[in-house]
Image: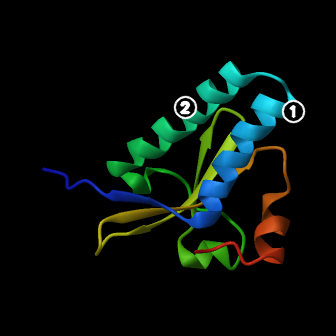
């Protein structure tokens, strides 16, 4: 039997999903769409409890060496780390797919 992983959101990832909701709801004036989108993101993240290593590693350093993985959900990408010993998945960041994520992640300290 496969042991489930515990999914943890970093504080920055919580800010990311809150910002996604706010942008869609208030800037685009589509609160129902905002709710649906953030629910799909959360559901995709929840599914990482089983087989979290099924998604690809990022291909840029230093994040690749750290084992950072990426999971696409609609027009967004979830970046996360797994810890097999502790059976945890840490959601590091959630970005809109059209952004230059490599530059953002390398410019700022975005981890826990």
- Mark 1 — residue? 27
Q: Position of residue 38 (x, y in %)?
A: 60, 35
Query: In the image, is 15 to the left or to the right of 25?
Result: left
Task: Report the quarter where the C terminus lies.
Answer: bottom right
Q: Which element carries disc 2, helix, strand or loop?
A: helix
* Whether residue 15 is visible: yes
- The residue shown at (66%, 20%) is 32
Nearer to us in this view, 82 or 60: 82
Q: Position of residue 36 (x, y in %)?
A: 60, 25
Residue extending furthest toward the front: 26
- Mark 2 or mark 1: name the one nearer the start of the chain: 1
* Whether residue 93 is visible: no
Q: Which element carries disc 1, helix, strand or loop?
A: helix
- Alpha-carbon distance for marks 2 and 1? 20 Å
Query: In the image, is 34 to the left or to the right of 10?
Result: right
Q: Would you say the residues marked 2 and 1 are in contact, meaning their CB atoms lie under 8 Å apart?
A: no
Residue extending furthest toward the left: 1
Mark 2 residue crowding within 10 angstroms, few (<14) / some (14–19) / many (20+): some
Q: Position of residue 99 (x, y in %)?
A: 84, 51
Nearer to us in this view, 24 or 82: 24
Query: In the image, is 26 to the left or to the right of 71?
Result: right
- The residue shown at (25%, 53%) is 4
* Quadrant in the picture for residue 102: bottom right
Mark 1 residue crowding within 10 angstroms, few (<14) / some (14–19) / many (20+): few
Foreground mark, 2 or 1, reads: 1
On residue 38, the disc is none
- The residue shown at (40%, 54%) is 52
- Mark 2 — residue? 40
- The residue shown at (30%, 66%) is 87
Q: Identify whether 66 is placed above or below 40.
A: below
Q: How many marks?
A: 2
């Amino acid at each position: 039997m496969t042991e489930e992983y515990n999914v943890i959101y970093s504080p920055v990832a919580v800010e990311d999903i809150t910002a996604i909701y706010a942008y869609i709801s208030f800037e685009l004036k589509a609160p129902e769409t905002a709710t649906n989108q953030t629910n799909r993101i959360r559901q995709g993240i929840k599914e990482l409890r089983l087989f979290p290593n099924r998604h690809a590693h990022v291909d840029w350093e230093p994040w690749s060496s750290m084992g950072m993985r990426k999971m696409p959900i609609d027009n967004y990408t979830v970046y996360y780390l797994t810890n097999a010993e502790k059976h945890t998945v840490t959601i590091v960041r959630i970005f809109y797919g059209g952004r230059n994520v490599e530059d953002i992640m390398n410019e700022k300290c975005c981890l826990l």
